[in-house]
Image (spheres, helix red, strand yellow):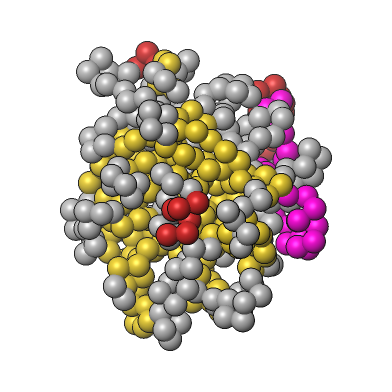
Amino acid sequence: MTVKPQHGGSTARFLLAVVLLLVVGGGVLFKLYVAPQVGDFRVILNAIVGSGIDTPEESRLKQTLNIDERFTLRIFAANLPNARWLLPTSRDDLLVSRPRKGDIVLLHADSDGDGRSDGRETLLTELNMPHGMTLIGDWLYIAEQDAIGRVKFNAQARAVEGPFQRLLSGLPGGGNHWAKSLELGPDGWLYFNVGSSCNVCTEEDTRRGSLMRMRPDGSGAEIYAAGLRNAMGFAWAPWDQALYAADISRDLLGDDYPPDELNLVVEGGFYGWPFANGFGDADPDLGSLKPDTLDTIDPVLAIPAHTTPLGLHFPRHESLAEAFPRSAFMALHGSWNRSVPDGYRLELLQWQSDGQISVQTLVDGFWTGDDLVGRPVDVEEDSAGNLYLSDDYGSAVYRLSLSSDLP
């Protein structure tokens, strides 16, 4: 009798060896090139799976945080995991998107004057990583990771009416930067970002790394500006309707390079990624691939590297605009790609008469030097001029109110 050789065992051993080699090799590469630039692994877990902590007590926050004397801070809503983008309603309720939960939560306005939401309810569920939101009439528009849709919304009844309608589907989702913000422009178009799929690469889908726009009925979708790696925070200055976008630059080039950016965005403009960083520096990996005919527009402000600017908001209420003329509020989510963590604060940007933009910190201390208690995400205001700041790590929304004893 002839016994045929058995190859199953050797094949399995070979596959196991390959897997072990990949694991060991990946671990070595991570240790050599990534781990030295990671200041706190809790930030990576927050970015990957949305993990966070229970909201700290308000008394602890007031001891830990450094808050500009012009503001008083309250925890408007606690224990709200993965709280991301914010949208006030005409009733001064606050909508909060929670991408990892797939839902939109409605926080009731503070009607009893204690600085806290009077209640909450889940407005929508089973959405695909919902993030940005805006209101046009009685329509609530929501940006999922791969689509823009809308649903009828009755603000007074605090209820949606009818089904959620996807107007623009097939947008590139997933990858490193799946989250999409959504804003109504002064021209009546809806603007949204499409972040890059990677740290640095040439994208097959040209919509990646851009700001796009479409009409409110979902038609006419087009790229408005390109070369923006992940411009989630964008807004229009009320004094001249200029569009500004905060862009998150690439990683793994050291603690202090390249800077994140604030860009003055114009239609058809190209802002560098992936071929150029900062103020026109050729990228060490892909700079040589930049087409000679492609002109790069420099940022108007360098933001400290890896601090991750997200929410950008220009004040509208008279009290805020008077206290902070020609200004914007910007939330820095904080670094992962930095050996010494930086960011985790709320900044004030002020446009000076000479065109320069100055920066002042309004709230910091979420990173204490050895502990992490929060990561600011988005900033909005209500009809009374109160600011709201979301925190997807501290599972909270904070309210910042102007102090009553301002001069």
Q: Is residue 269 left or right of residue 398?
A: left
Splitting the image into 4 quarters, where does residue 132 fall?
bottom left
Q: Is residue 398 above or below residue 354?
A: below
Q: Position of residue 172 (x, y in %)?
A: 37, 48
- Residue 48 shows in the view: no
Instruction: Report the quarter where the N terminus lies.
Output: top right
- Write down the region rendered in magenta: 36-65
Q: Main secondary structure of the magenta part?
A: helix
Q: Residue furthest front?
A: 407
Q: Position of residue 250 (x, y in %)?
A: 50, 29
Q: Position of residue 305 (x, y in %)?
A: 56, 29
Q: Is residue 8 above or below residue 27?
A: below
- The residue that appears at 25% across and 54% down in the rendered structure is 186
Q: Position of residue 130 (x, y in %)?
A: 46, 61
- The residue that appears at 59% across and 56% down in the rendered structure is 406
Q: Residue furthest bottom?
A: 157
- The residue that appears at 53% across and 35% down in the rendered structure is 359
User: Residue 231 magenta-drawn?
Assistant: no
Front residue of this view, candidates 175 and 218: 218
Front residue of this view, candidates 145 and 116: 116
User: Residue 43 magenta-drawn?
Assistant: yes
Splitting the image into 4 quarters, where does residue 76 fall?
bottom right
Q: Is residue 273 left or right of residue 249?
A: left
